[in-house]
Image (spheres, grey):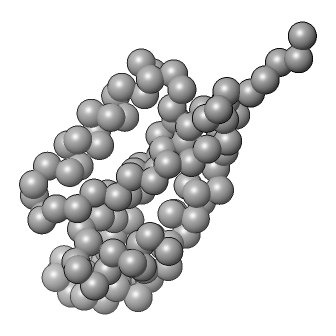
Amino acid sequence: MEKTSPPYENFTLAIIPMGIPAIGKSKVFESLLKLEKALEMFSFDLVSSDDIRKECMDKYMLEHPSADRNVAFKNTQGPYKPAFTRALNQAARKLVPGKVHCIIVDKNHPGNGMSASIQ
């Protein structure tokens, strides 16, 4: 008898929340990640805008020790955007055999920024 693949194999699902800052989007994602083992048909990747921005800011502050966090935030907009795009693309290319791969995009989306994240 020929083995058939589950209908969800090699399938990617992106979760892009909408909401104002500090409403609890990140907490929901953390809870989902804890449930990953219970949800055997899913694998999860979290792409966190805050984490990527923090990495960019930390690097900037190492290179510019006299800079404060506000200056670092302002001066990392350029490197942040491609770093976030790279992280999304890396997550989107990941296929987990036999599972639905869910990409959770943890980012604040202003009205004019949603289409860029979806693309």
Q: Nearer the viewer, residue 22 or 2?
A: 2
Residue 89 lies left or right of residue 21; in this view the side is right
Q: Nearer the viewer, residue 69 or 19?
A: 19
Residue 94 lies left or right of residue 76; in this view the side is right
Residue drawn at the location 25% of the way across and 88% of the way down: 74
Write down the quadrant of residue 68 in the picture.
bottom left
In the image, residue 42 lies at what x, y percent?
51, 32
Report the number of numbered marks: 0
Residue drawn at the location 64% of the way across and 49% of the way down: 94
Above or below residue 70? Residue 59 is above
Above or below residue 18? Residue 61 is below
The answer to whether residue 51 of the structure is visible from this angle is: no
Residue drawn at the location 78% of the way across and 23% of the way down: 4
In the current view of this chain or complex, which residue is farthest to the top? 1
Write down the quadrant of residue 78 in the picture.
bottom left
In the image, residue 1 lies at what x, y percent?
89, 10
Q: Nearer the viewer, residue 71 or 102?
A: 102
Residue 96 lies left or right of residue 48; in this view the side is right
